[in-house]
Image (cartoon, coloured by chain):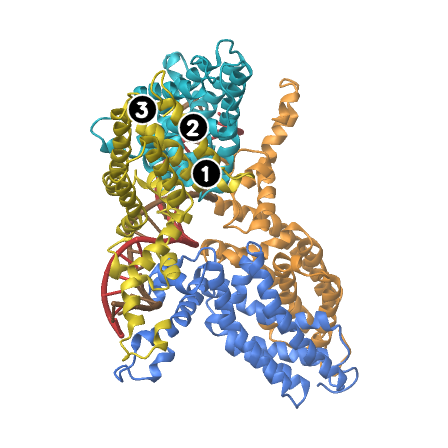
Chain colours: A cyan, B yellow, C blue, D orange, E red, F brown
DNA sequence: GATGAATGAGAATTCATTCAT
DNA sequence: GATGAATGAATTCTCATTCAT
C-alpha cells in the first residue's frame, strides 16, 4: 500500500518498484493468512495467492516458512515497540499517564489491527518451533517487560506508586491486553456482543490506578 | 497384554477393569501428547503408544481426533469447574475469600498440572476447529465467567466490593491466571528463573483487593 | 515371488505372509526403478506402483529413499559377496581357477541380472550422497578388493603368479567387469550388436593368464 | 561489469573479447559445476554465478541445460580425440609405443583434469537423456574405440601383437582408465591413500605388453 | 545483448483414518 | 474387542525456463 503515493503513469519503472514492495506485500499477506489459520495450518500457496504472486516467488524473498513468520512478527510488532520505547524515553508527566498511553497504544495499534493475531500465533507455535519462541522472547517479550518495569520503577521512585513486586506487576499489567488479543483470535466469532476492549481497558486502568496508589495517599 | 497373567475364569476382574479403564487411559495419554505437541502436531500413533494400545483401538472409543480432544478437555477441566461451582454454592464467608479460594484452586489444580496445557491448546486450535471453540466457550468459559460474575455480584450486594463493570472485571481476574498457563506452555523452557506463580498470585490478589475495595472503606 | 511355494487356499494367513514378503517386494521393485532412472530421478511413486503398494506403505518399511537404496544394494550384492568369500575360503585348486570362478560368478550373477544396474547407480550418486558412497565403499568395494587381493597373494605364494603390484592388479581385474556393467546401463540400448560379455570375459581371462604367468615359466 | 573501467571509444577491445569469450567461459563453469554435482543436481544458477553472468545470459548461448552439457563434452573431450587421431596417423614406431602414448595422453589430459568428471557424468545420465547417450556414443566412444582398434590391427599386421579379439581387447585397454576416472569422481574423497594412477598405468601397460606379445616371441 | 524477477510443475514425506484379520 | 498394515491426500520447497525491462 505504500506505493500509492506515485502515479502509475509517470514513466514509473513499475518493475523496480515492485521488487522493493514485494517483501512487504508478502509479509502483509502472510500476516493475514497466518492469523486466520495459524502458522502450521497456513498454506504458503494461500499466502502467495493473497500476495498476488506465485509460490516460487515467496522463496525469492524468504528462505522458508519460519523465516517468513519471523519477518511478519518483526514488521508488525517491532515498530510499535520502538515507538513505545521512544515514548518512555521522552516522558515527562506522571508515570501513570505513561502507563495509560502505553496500554492505549497497544489497544489501538495491536489489538484492533491484524497484528493482534500475533500473540495467538506465538502461543500456538512456541512449543513446536523453539526457535520462534526464543526469537519472540528475546525480541519482543523481554523488551516489552523491561519497558513496563521501567515505568513502574519510575513511578515508585517518584513516589507516585507504592512499592510493588515489579516482575509480577508487569505481568498483571500485560495480561488483560494479551488475553484480549487471544480472545479476538479465538472466540470473537462466537459472541453475539463483541468484546468491549474500550471498557476493558478502562476497567483495567481503573483497577491499576487503585492497586498502584501509595498507601494512604491519593490515587496516582 | 499384561492381563494374560490372571486366569480368565476367576472373575477376571483385572481384564474387566481394564476394559472400562481404557477410555480414561487413552484420554490421559492424549492430554500428555496434546500438551507436548499441540493438537495438530500430535500424532495419534504417539497417543496410542503412550496408552499402550494400538492405533485402531483409539477409534473404538473415539470417532476421531477432534472428539478425543473434546474428551480430554471434559475430563481435565469440567470436574474442576464442578468443584468450583459447589464451592461457591456453599460459600458463607466474605466474598474476597471465595475469590481467593477459586484462584488458588485454579493455580493448584490447573496451572501446575498437565491440565495447564489446555488453554494453550484451545487458543491454538480455536481458529481451525470452530466446533472445538464453541464447545469450550459454552462448556468452560461461559460457566467460569458466570461463576466469577456471581462472586463479584455477591460481593457488591454485600457491600464488600465497590460496584464494578462485572464483565470487564471478570476478565481482569482471569487474565493473569490464563497468562500463566500460556506462559508455561510457551516460554517456561526459555527462562532461567521459572515464573513464580505463587508470587504472581499474591500480587494479583493484593491488587484485586485494593481495586475492589469500596470507596473510602477498608480493603475487603 | 518366494511365496509361490505354498498354495494360497491352505488356510494361509495371507496377510501375515504379506507383511514378511513386502520388504523384499519393495526392494525388488526399487532395484528395477532405480536401475531404469537412477536414484535421484526415480520416483518413489513408481517404486510403489511397481511393488503394488501405495506410496505410504514404502515408509512403513524404509525410513526414506536413501535407506531403501541401501537395502537394494544389500539385497542384490552382499549375498554374492558372501558366496564369493566362502568360495575362496574353501578353494583348493590352482589360484587362476579361483579367479576364473570369481569373474564368472560376477558375470552370471551380477552382470546379467538386474543387480548389474547397481554399479551405475553408485557411480552416479556417490558425489551427491556421500553417505551412500561410504556405505558402498566399506561394505562392497573393500571386501571385493580384499577378496581379489587374497587370491593374488595366494597365487604368488604358491608360485603360480609372478609377483605383482597387488593393488593395481586388483583394479585391472575388476575394471573390465565393472565397465561391462556400466556399459549395459548406458549404451546397450544404442548398439545394434549387444556387448558380448562372454567373449569379453574370455579375452580378459586370456590376457590375465598371460599377464600373471611367472617369468619364463608356463602360463598359470 | 568489470568491462566498464575501459573507455568505450578506444577500440573497446576488452569488451569485444569478452563477448566472444562468453560461451567458453560458460562451458568452463559448467564443466566444473557438473563435475561437482552431476548433471541433474547441478543448478544453472551456480553455473551462471561461476561464469560471472546472469541466469538469463546462459540462454542466449545455449537453448537448454542438455545442450550446454553437450557443449561441455565437446569442448573437453573432442580436442583430445583429435590430437589422438593425429598422433596415430603420424605414428611410425612400434605399435605398443603408440598405445603407451595414447594411454599416457588420457592419463594426463583427461584423468587428472576437470575433464575427468565427464565419464561419470555420461554414465550417470545416459539412462535419462538418451539423446546425450547417443551423442557421446557417436562422437566419443565410437571414435575412441576405432582409434584403439586401428592401433591393435596395426600391431597385429606388423607382427608386434598376437592376433586378438579386437573388440574385446579395446575394452580391456580402456576399462582401467575409465575406472580410474570414475573412481576419482566417486570414492577418491573416502580414501586415505589416493589412487596411484601412475602405478596403475604402469601395471596396466606391463600386463598389456605380456598379453599382446606374440606366442613364443619376445614382448612387443 | 544482458538482466534477474517471476513462474509453476514436480517429488518426498507425514499421518488420520480404514478395515481385513 | 483389538490389531496394525495399508492408504492417499496434502504440503513445503526447488529450479529450469521465460520475458519485461
C23 displayed left or right of C80:
left
Q: Residues within 10 Å of mark 3 (few under 14, many from 20)?
A: many
Estimate the x, y position of residue D16 in percent, counting from the top left: 61, 28
Q: Residues within 10 Å of mark 1 (few under 14, many from 20)?
A: some
Up/down of B44 relative to C13, above or below: above
* Residue A199 found in image quarter: top left
Residue pictured at 26% horizontal, 45% vertical:
B82
Secondary structure under tag 3 reads: loop
Q: Is residue D148 visible?
A: yes
Residue pictured at 25% horizontal, 59% vertical:
B61
Secondary structure under tag 2 reads: helix
Estimate the x, y position of residue C112 in percent, counting from the top left: 48, 74
* Residue D111 found in image quarter: bottom right
Up/down of D123 relative to C73, above or below: above
Secondary structure under tag 1 reads: helix
Q: Which residue is mark 3?
A: B161
Tell me the subunit letter for badge 2: B
Q: Whole-Å distance between the Cαs marked 3 and 2?
A: 14 Å
Pointer 3 or 2: first along the chain: 3
B20 displayed left or right of D168:
left
Front disc: 1 or 3 = 3
Q: Whole-Å distance between the Cαs marked 2 and 1?
A: 41 Å
Tell me the subunit letter for badge 3: B
Tell me the subunit letter for badge 1: A
Pick the front one: D117 or D103: D117
User: Residue lying furthest right in this view?
Assistant: C216
Residue pictured at 65% horizontal, 26% vertical:
D13
Is the C terminus of chain D in the top left, top right, bottom left or bottom right quadrant?
bottom right
Asked whether the residues under the numbered discs 1 and 3 touch, taking CB atoms below 8 Å apart as contact, a structural biologist would say no
* Residue C62 found in image quarter: bottom left
Up/down of C156 relative to C48, above or below: below
Q: Which residue is mark 1?
A: A66
Amino acid at each position: 500500500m505504500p506505493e500509492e503515493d506515485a502515479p502509475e503513469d509517470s514513466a514509473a519503472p513499475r518493475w523496480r518498484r515492485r521488487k522493493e514492495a514485494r517483501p512487504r506485500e508478502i509479509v502483509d499477506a502472510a500476516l493475514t493468512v497466518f492469523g486466520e489459520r495459524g502458522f502450521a495450518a497456513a498454506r504458503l500457496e494461500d499466502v502467495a495467492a493473497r500476495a498476488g504472486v506465485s509460490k516460487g516467488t515467496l522463496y525469492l524473498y524468504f528462505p522458508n516458512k519460519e523465516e517468513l513468520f519471523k519477518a511478519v512478527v518483526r514488521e508488525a510488532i517491532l515498530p510499535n515497540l520502538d515507538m513505545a520505547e521512544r515514548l518512555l524515553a521522552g516522558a515527562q508527566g506522571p508515570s501513570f499517564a505513561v502507563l495509560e498511553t502505553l496500554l492505549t497504544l497497544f489497544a489501538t495499534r495491536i489489538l484492533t489491527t491484524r497484528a493482534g493475531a500475533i500473540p495467538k500465533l506465538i502461543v500456538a507455535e512456541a512449543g513446536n518451533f523453539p526457535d520462534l519462541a526464543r526469537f519472540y522472547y528475546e525480541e519482543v517479550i523481554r523488551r516489552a517487560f523491561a519497558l513496563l518495569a521501567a515505568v513502574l520503577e519510575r513511578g515508585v521512585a517518584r513516589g507516585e506508586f507504592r512499592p510493588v513486586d515489579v516482575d509480577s506487576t508487569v505481568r498483571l499489567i500485560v495480561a488483560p491486553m494479551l488475553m484480549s488479543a487471544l480472545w479476538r483470535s479465538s472466540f470473537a466469532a462466537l459472541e453475539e456482543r463483541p468484546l468491549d476492549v474500550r471498557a476493558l481497558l478502562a476497567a483495567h486502568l481503573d483497577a491499576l490506578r487503585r492497586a498502584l496508589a501509595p498507601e494512604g495517599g491519593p490515587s496516582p
